[in-house]
Amino acid sequence: MNLLTRNEITASSFFDGSGSGLTTFNFIPLLFIFAAYFFLIRRAKLHMESKKLPKYNDISSSQLKHIASRQTLRELSGDIDVAVVGSGVGALSHAAVLAKQGFRVAVFEQNQVVGGCTHTFTKEGFSFDTGVHYVGGMSSVVKNLYDQISDGQLKWNKIDKTYDVIYNGTTGERIEMTDDHDENRRVLTEHFGIEATSWKRFDRAKFWAKFWSYFVFQLKLWHPLVLRLTWPFVALPYRRYAIRGTTDVLLNECGFSPQAAGALVYHWGDHGTPPANCPFFMTALLDSHYKGGAYFPRGGSQSIAKTLVAAIQRRGGHVFASSPVEKILTMKNLFGQHSAYGVRVHGVDVLVKRFVVSDAGFMKTFGMDSDDDTKHHALVGVEAGAVQRSLLRKDKSVSVLEVDDGIFEVLSKKAGDKVSPCISDLSLFIGLDRSDEDLGLRAQNVWHVHDWDHDKAFQKMLNDTSAELSTADQTPFLFISNESAKDPDWPLTHPNKSTSEVIAVVKSSLFEKWANTTHEAREKDEEYVALKQHLTKSFLEAFYLHFPKARGHVVYTSLGTPLTMNKFLGRCHGEVYALDHDISRFDGVDVQRALHPQTCVENLFLTGEDAFVVSVTACMLSGYVTAARASWGSWFSVPPTLLKLIIGLPQIFFH
């Protein structure tokens, strides 16, 4: 009788909360169990659905070349929810997320092929990857995010265990970086005599840099007002730990020798900003980005675009190539605020029901007050974009670039703006008539640096007055990537052939004399052609130094210049990574507001590297973040996808 009474009491208290039944302490585990079950069901469903879909190598490349006719544009006007400008990873990721939520999306790309830096081009039987060379940080969270937007069709191949080789062109030192992060540290320690205390200080500085940069970056998920209210409380530690110059931290705080510090930041070309002016959090993230190795998309970089475009089209979305957006349409609302309501393509005004998203970069979208050309040719009108541009303006703007015996030299940037375009580059595409195996081309990269003082080499390049000086022995670094060796599908589609690419940074101003000529006219200009031949010969000699078996087997070369970047990627000044990733780009609440996904123009949002940071994965994340910011309902309509983003960001930052 007593036992029955106790059971009745327990059952009653479980439901009314008065006893020890459904309390906070036993409800939380149940919540986690249900959440885990829900995620497993979703993952199993995605896996089953993905088996029925065409694989990455079965998707036709023609899907990347659809052109919008005027009639099609007129039919779309007023019938789509979202117009996306550009088709980089950020744009396609954003469009794929929205398409899965039921939005009618249309993506407009100015180039002949969709994909931004993921697109490939074919010449004389060779296919060349233009912008994706290797991808790190491939955690389970990141893979799941890629699976969500590609319907599980995007596949990755792990490249060589030794993914990077560092070569000092001045001293001849050669250091191999492997997927074993601890082994890399042991190699650097033995090579440069690094003390254990330096590594401990470095790890401590890394943790706090990642912590405060994560805190600031996750503010992009919320309304800009949250950024304004939060900034006074985070600005001091953020500046102290996250955006100090990398050279300053490594030499003065961690105690590394200049040579060891130079080797530690050998891959500063991944973001394009030399160490002295690079915020330390970028170095902190990059240091562990390739922990566990590097990856390359199967089928080449175009597989990223192909699988995302297929996912968008599968849900009724549209992706158009050769369809440049001429203008983002805006009007003033009742409160005098400018609001975006569509885009103009091929002279046709395409109206949207919800909002417009730009992946064209800040300069292309709004222009810069210090650059009248970009301001007056921006996609957003001069008046409509005035507030957004003003956020980047300040009276004095400086940039620390050169270090000489511990003294930092302050150099002026373009007057009036806090940020400026990133440095440009030269890209030599090489086609060879033998297989990678025959020529000893491994699935790895070579960083051929001028010496360990990257800041001095970079400053020397800035002082160059002629493009002829941008040779292999003068440039701050050469990045050599064996693209065909990284793709296991390459031998099946291109037997007995291989490709490589050599990249070097360069000032875009050295090519200004040809800026107002057409691509076809430049290729017939004797001086321009002679310059490209001179640089090509220099880069090939450096390539042969590392891969001597390749000599005599190069059958095709093509050198891309800053003007090539302008034509095919829609850049303004040949910038390789849009806005420069220097300290000033990340410092100050106004800059953070200017590069927030939600712009000052109502119903206009930014995505891509300017709204986040550079890298394929960062751009993919920016697509998710902008989708979350642009449509608050997305938090509830697709909980697994966006909850993974919220939960996964710490794992990505602290990988």
Image: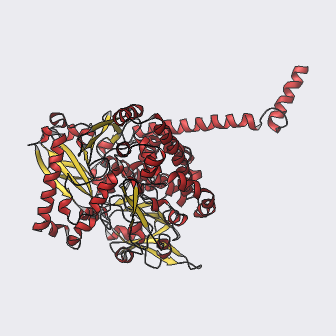
| Count of numbered circles on the image | 0
Residue 650, relative to residue 469: is it above or below?
Answer: above
Query: Which residue shows up at 55% across the image and 76% down it?
Result: 337
Q: Would residue 4 be seen by someone viewing this image from the given angle?
A: yes
Q: Residue furthest left?
A: 552
Expressed as whole percent of the image width and height from the top left, the position of residue 146 reads 43, 45
Of 357 and 422, the residue lying toward us: 422
Q: Is residue 186 left or right of residue 549?
A: right
Expressed as whole percent of the image width and height from the top left, the position of residue 170 reads 23, 46
Q: Would residue 620 be seen by someone viewing this image from the given angle?
A: no
Of 101 and 131, the residue lying toward us: 131
- Residue 382 placement: quadrant: bottom left
Q: Residue furthest front?
A: 405
Of 373 and 600, the residue lying toward us: 373
Colour theme: secondary structure
State the quadrant of the N terminus.
top right
Expressed as whole percent of the image width and height from the top left, the position of residue 455 reads 34, 54
Q: Is residue 208 left or right of residue 608?
A: right
Expressed as whole percent of the image width and height from the top left, the position of residue 518 reads 20, 70
Q: Is residue 131 left or right of residue 317?
A: left
